[in-house]
Image: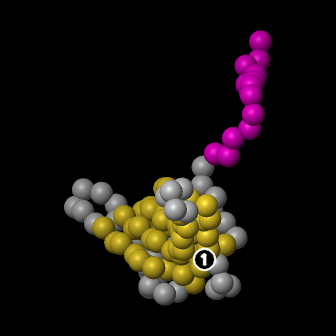
């Protein structure tokens, strides 16, 4: 009798959304936030208006640096999952027991294409 796999329930997205040429991406974290959040309260202190503006998408991905790769500089543009980000910070971590680890943070501003 052949062993057939059976899936139950709904489909899930597995793994990472994209790749980088200079590292093996092991994890990514994407968040959507607003830089401006202004609440207006009435005389009793109840919030009656909330202004949300200047949407930002922030990403952090971490992984292992490839052997002959160059790490990107801050301020450069990169694309991940079809969205263009500005590189805000790069952390390059090494130990004598493990591969060289890289953490890259980027941001997409609402009004910057």
Residue at 45 percent of width and 79 percent of height: 88
The range drawn in magenta is: 1-14
| Residue with the most extreme front position | 43
Which secondary structure class fits the magenta region best? loop
Image coordinates of residue 70 in percent, x first then y, are 44, 80
Image coordinates of residue 71 in percent, x first then y, are 43, 79
Q: Is residue 42 magenta?
A: no
Count of number-bearing discs: 1
24 relative position to 91: left or right: right
Q: Is residue 12 magenta?
A: yes
Relative to 35, is 61 above or below?
Answer: above
Q: Quadrant of residue 77?
A: bottom right
Local crowd size for mark 1, using a 10 Å CA cut-off: few (<14), some (14–19), many (≥20): few
Residue at 69 percent of width and 41 percent of height: 12
Residue at 54 percent of width and 81 percent of height: 86
| Residue with the most extreme left position | 96
**Location of mark 1 (residue):** 54
Q: Quadrant of residue 101?
A: bottom left
Quadrant showing the N terminus? top right
Relative to 89, is 29 above or below?
Answer: above
Image coordinates of residue 76 in percent, x first then y, are 52, 86
92 relative position to 72: left or right: left
Q: Nearer the viewer, residue 3 or 54?
A: 54
Relative to 24, is 87 above or below?
Answer: below
Image coordinates of residue 72 in percent, x first then y, are 47, 81
Residue at 40 percent of width and 75 percent of height: 90
| Residue with the most extreme top position | 1
């Amino acid at each position: 009798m052949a062993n057939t796999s059976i899936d139950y329930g709904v489909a899930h997205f597995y793994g990472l959304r994209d790749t980088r040429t200079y590292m093996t991406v092991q994890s990514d974290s994407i968040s959507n936030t607003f830089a401006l959040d202004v609440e207006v309260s009435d005389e009793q202190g109840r919030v009656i208006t909330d202004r949300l503006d200047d949407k930002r998408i922030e990403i952090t991905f971490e992984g292992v640096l490839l052997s002959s790769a160059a790490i990107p500089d801050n301020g450069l543009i990169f694309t991940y999952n079809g969205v263009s980000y500005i590189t805000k910070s790069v952390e390059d971590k090494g130990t004598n027991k493990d591969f060289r680890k890289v953490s890259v943070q980027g941001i997409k501003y609402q009004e910057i294409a």
